[in-house]
Amino acid sequence: MERELGCDVLVIGGGVAGLTTAVVLAEGGVRVRLWTRDPVEGTTSAVAGGLWWPYRVEPVESARAWALRSLDVYEELAERPDTTGARMAEGVLGETALDDVGAWAAARLPGLRPATAGEYPGGSGVWARLPLIDMPAHLPYLRERFLAAGGVVEARTAADLAGTGAPVVVNCTGLGARELVPDPSVRPVRGQLVIVENPGVRTWTVSTGADGAPAYVLPQPGRLVLGGTAEEDAWSTEPDPAVADAIVRRCTALRPEIAGLRVLDHRVGLRPARDAVRLERAVLPDGTVLIHNYGHGGGGVTVAWGCAEEAAKLATG
């Protein structure tokens, strides 16, 4: 039943989880408002590297199902990369053998094969063709798609999940859920990136070296995204010059052709980690139906569409 807010569902959170959920709902004929504290360009999602692959997201079986559904959508969106920011790109998952990938992905990604020594000199790797999402382009695309479906976006911060004036609220606040719910089990995993010019690199590389430090090179339009870090419970969003230098060294060891490239920017994002994604329905004391959709860790882009469709069913079922 509609309340005074003038919508059927209120989505809180303007990152990839919130926007995708809002799109699914609005395109399904639901009247939706979206509240976002930050413009889409200022969300954690805007900092994401954008490679489709489950990373630091639990539970594993659910995450794989959500990821496969999202893969279907990204493959479709990749037919219009200039509009959607999504494209299919080839690259290497380092320190990975073909048997490590698992049947869940192998059955859906028939092009998987062992990487050659020329493609990945550092050791064992798997060559794959995966969605690579340019998040600074994809997030505005989602926003415009939501608006075109009749949605309304408001720059507004939610102080409470109850009393919003909406009969149904979908909580996609990511790390903000720590205070808003409150849910102290949501914690930051800090990721730092270095953005450099792209001399013509077209393939991506992801690696975890012998020291366990992640390294990845992701080609995006007009730039290369170099990463990264995964610092547990680190809250600083200020780039650390020493960390940036280490990222560049690790990535140069992976891809020597990027040595000496001009640095364009430094970015930091705080992944909203949780022991398991919280995707569930509850009813608040005031009668508000509350759907939680947060805690996606480093896999928000990867599972976005699968989670959005499940959240939409909970919101309208």
Image (spheres, grey):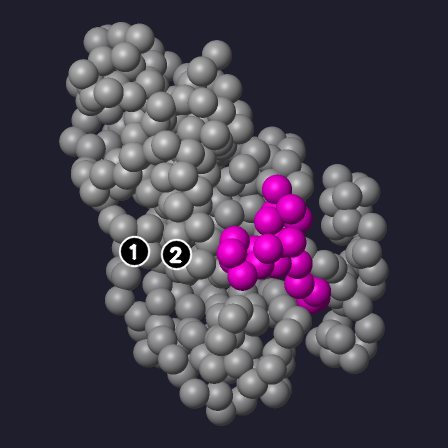
Task: Write the residue at 41% across / 22% down.
Answer: 30
Q: Crowding near pointer 1: few (<14 within 10 Å), some, many (20+)?
A: few
Quarter residue 12 falls in: top left
Where is residue 186 shown, x and y percent of the image?
A: 35, 38
Quadrant housing the N terminus: top left
**Relative height, residue 2 to residue 6 (above, below):** above
State if disc 2 and disc 1 touch (CB < 8 Å). yes
Question: Can see residue 84?
Answer: yes
The image quarter in which residue 236 lies: bottom left
| Residue 263 spot, x, y in % from top left | 40, 83
**What's the residue at 43%, 87% (across, down)?**
262
Could you tell whether 307 is left or right of 256 in the image?
A: left
Q: Amino acid at mark 2?
A: Ala
Q: CA distance from mark 1 to mark 2?
A: 6 Å
Left or right: 152 as drawn, with respect to 59: left
Callout 1, which amino acid? Gly
Q: Residue at x 49, y 91 (%)?
A: 260
Q: Measured along the vertical axis of the image, is residue 135 above or below residue 162?
A: below
Q: Secondary structure at mark 1?
A: helix
Q: Which residue is mark 1?
A: 42
Q: Is residue 278 visible?
A: no
Circle 2 is placed at which residue position? 46
Whether 47 is among the magenta residues is no
Magenta residues span 73-95
Expressed as whole percent of the image width and height from the top left, the position of residue 191 reads: 41, 60
Residue 11, picture quadrant: top left
Secondary structure found at label 2: helix
Residue at coordinates 39% horizontally, 66% vertically from top-left? 192
In the rendered image, the vertical position of residue 127 relative to residue 75, given as above or below: below
Residue 81: mark: none
